[in-house]
Amino acid sequence: MTVIAAIKTPTGVAIGGDSGAFEETGSLKMHSSDPKVFRFGPWLVGGAGSFKVLNLIAKATLGEPYALAAYLQKEMTGDPGEWSVLCVSGQGVYEISSDYSVVAYREPYASVGISAELVTGSLAILSALEGWTAKDIITSAMQVAVKHSTGCEAPIKIFNYNF
């Protein structure tokens, strides 16, 4: 259980992920030192649901969603359970699901993980505000999840870049 949030604005992109390592029941096990978000060239990538998938993402160093989905499908062994990966760049926001399908979102934001509904609602409201950067929006949405969800733990790691 975790939350990953990504956004593309007219001036940049950002992705954020929490630090909780949760049991399947949803209870906090530990705080993870393993990253859940990454930057690979122009792509920001984050994953929820499986540290095995996160380890493969780190090894792949790929951000382009279709290439990453193909790599994960080729390299995956065993059943890592349900997981989701977000990829964001100037091209948009994409999700790779545990069946290796890729969805390109019409909205310029998305979130995955246990707190996704809370964070997606926050992203919808915050993205409508004038003068906020992609990093500002992700930071605030993730702070809402830390405060109001038992499935999201600080500290939050954020990657961003401006166009």
Image: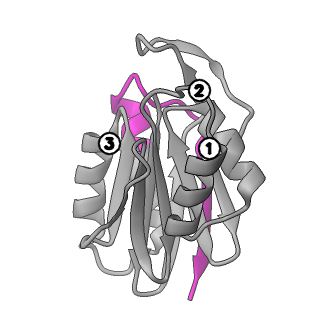
* Image coords of residue 3 (percent x, y): 44, 40
**Residue at coordinates 56% horizontally, 89% vertically from top-left?**
163
Kind of residue sitting beneath label 1 = Lys
SS for callout 2: loop
Residue 117 in the image: state x and y as whole percent: 25, 42
The residue drawn where x is 50% and y is 63% is 87
Q: Amino acid at mark 3?
A: Ala
Q: Quadrant of residue 71?
A: bottom right
Q: Which residue is mark 2?
A: 78
The label number, if any, that marks residue 116 in the structure image: 3
* Residue 36 tag number: 1
Which residue shows up at 40% across the image and 69% down it?
93
Residue nearest the viewer, comparing 52 with 110? 52
Relative image position of residue 116 (x, y in whole percent): 32, 42
Marked residue nearer the N-terminal end (3 or 1): 1
Residue 72 seen in the current view? yes
The residues colored magenta run 143-163
Q: Choose between 67 and 5: the one closer to the eye.
A: 67
**Number of marks in the image?**
3
Q: Residues within 10 Å of mark 2 (few under 14, many from 20)?
A: few
- Residue 85 image offset from top left, x and y in percent: 48, 50
> 122 and 17: which one is in front?
17
How does the figure colour the protein chain or chains?
A: one colour
Is residue 5 rendered magenta in the image?
Answer: no
